[in-house]
Image (spheres, rainbow, N blue to C red):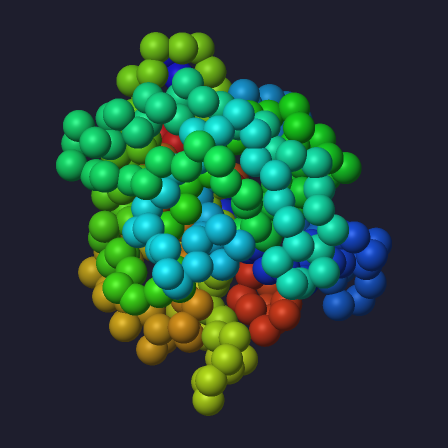
Amino acid sequence: MAKIIGGITTSHIPAIGVAIDKGLEDTPYYRDLFAIYPPIRQWLNEEKPDIAVLFYNDHGLEMWLDKKPTFAIGCAPKYENADEGWGIKPIPPVTGETELSWHIVNHLIENDFDPTVCQDIKVDHGATVPMTLLWPNHSYQGIKVIPVAINCERHPMPKPSRSYAFGKAIGDAIRCWERDAKVVLLGTGGLSHQLDGPRAGILNGDFDNYCMDKLVSDPQELCKFSNVDLIEKGGAQMVELAMWLAMRGALGEGIPEERLRNYVSPISNTGVGVQLLIPEE
């Protein structure tokens, strides 16, 4: 049977991708951020997961305001990316995992979720920045990826409790897949930030760390928030906590071991949280 070996949270700030392209990892502005990732990369190299289920949000590359699914899952054999205006260089395609993707889709529909199925889709920085952070030098080509997009741009958006339940259903689907495979979960985005408007640049480090605490010990507390609550506390893009909650729901019941944790703020006016969670046996 497939086994979920861990969950990782990380930002997908496009400026990180630009920093990688320009070799700025060891500059004063970025040094503390990039210092977070070598221990996680070491863990990935030791555990060698076969598949990554990547919870992200599309920022307009493929799913714009005229077509915005609440939940979407990639079922393609590969995923190319494109420059969406941030100047990030295209990277080699991400390899898909079609059999588990379709298994998840069928399980979700049987359990009252109706995701949009994407058999031809490009992925934006929401997916490619985490992949290049965790598997540098294009080494992500050695792992198969299932991109799972959650709407965080256009109202109405799924409430936090719904994203958590969605992730839980995906975790159940993975655990009942009758193939020997090691699966790692990636919850990307956030934490507190707002890109425009009168509150642009808002940060709330206290709330960010509260969310990281509760993600481990009591994610149901985070499910009590509405999206309006999250926006008020952490800015318009704090709703990207949806991907963290989906990852945590998929990780399973019980309190996971928090193997690694760090928080850096600000990077591109964003609070960056990183965690490595190992599920309870």
Q: Is residue 221 above or below residue 234?
A: above
Q: Is residue 158 left or right of residue 208?
A: left
The correct choice, above or below, for 56 with respect to 270 in the image is above
x and y percentages locating residue 155 in the rendered image: 30, 66
Residue 162 visible (yes or no): yes
Q: Residue 129's x, y, as percent?
A: 62, 49
- Left/right placement of residue 33 relative to residue 64 reads right
Q: Nearer the viewer, residue 234 or 63?
A: 63
Please report the residue visible at 35 percent of the width from the left and 24 percent of the height from the top: 102
Q: Residue at x 65, y 34 (%)?
A: 93
138 or 153: nearer the eye?
153
Left or right: 30, with 273 as reference point: right
Residue 217 visible in image? no
Q: Residue at x 24, y 26 (%)?
A: 107
- Which quadrant of the figure contains the C terminus? top left
Residue 13, compared with residue 215, is above or below; it is below
Answer with left or right where residue 281 lies relative to residue 278.
left
Quarter of the figure with the N terminus = top left
